[in-house]
Amino acid sequence: MMFQRTAMIAGNWKMNPRHSDAEALVKTIAQGIEGLEGVDVLVAPPFTHLALVREAIGSARIFLGGQNMHWEMSGAFTGEISGRMLQEATCTHVILGHSERRILFNETSETVDLKVRAATFLGLIPIVCVGETLEEREAGQTFEVIRAQLDASFHNFKADQLMRPSTILAYEPVWAIGTGRTATPAQAQEVHRFIREWIENTFNTGTAAQVRILYGGSVKPENIADLMSEPDIDGALVGGASLKGDSFVQIIRYGKA
Ligand code: PEP
């Protein structure tokens, strides 16, 4: 039986934009998606913009997410934000294990696992990122690398034999992030299929059918429709193109212009 997964288009703002530009960006998105159904829209602003962005969202159907969190609830962790704090700032989702965090801030799948567990415990939906580097792809190690990231990033879920179907994954090949170089729909589909099979083998068929797997890496209005036509691509995690209201709306409205 085919399970109909609702598409999700998520904007990862990273360390952008300026506070003064965030409100206008949200308003453009809110206007652009008015009356639109069948797609979940999310923005993940910097922590310092969360309150402003929540206010700007108003009654629009836009989910709010954090870009990272600590796995403890509170304590002496200078510079960190807990999942509970994200919830207090009205976030429903949190991006975990983005490649920039893994590469630039030495985040490991082991800490991602602790964060996934803490987020899930709180009822925050994790968007867990995995992806290989160009070197790994060229060495023919893509599947091996993805499997290792999945095994370690979901170690606690595996121990409990349970992955909540609301969990979201994002396949983000490192070589396609911010480079203008997108994976072809076929390249992305192959890895998405692999991830879905991993969920099926590790948990069960029902969970595998429900979990959404987003693609990320230079998604633009020009390539979203082809990516979304693949059976295992359920949406996109968008960096650069989510900072321009018009292009983000075009991505969200792909095929519905
Ligand atoms: C990202 O960092 O999640 C991303 C996909 O960035 P970009 O769209 O800019 O490649």
Image: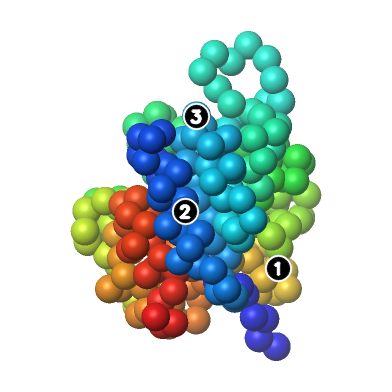
**Residue that mark 2 sits on:** 27
Q: Amino acid at mark 1?
A: Thr
Q: Nearer the viewer, mark 2 or mark 3?
A: 2
What separation in Å lies between label 1 and label 3 (alpha carbons)? 35 Å
Q: Nearer the viewer, mark 1 or mark 3?
A: 3
Is the CB of mark 3 within 8 Å of ligand 1?
Answer: no
Q: Quadrant of residue 17?
A: top left
Quarter of the image where the C terminus is located:
bottom left
**Residue that mark 3 sits on:** 48
* Residue at (54, 13) in percent of width and height: 78
* Residue at (44, 74) in percent of width and height: 253
Above or below, 128 against 228 in this view is: above
Q: How is the image coloured?
A: rainbow
Position of residue 123 measured from the top left corner of the image (x, y, whole percent):
75, 46
- 1 or 2: tag closer to the N-terminus: 2
Do tag 1 and tag 2 residues touch (Cβ < 8 Å)? Answer: no
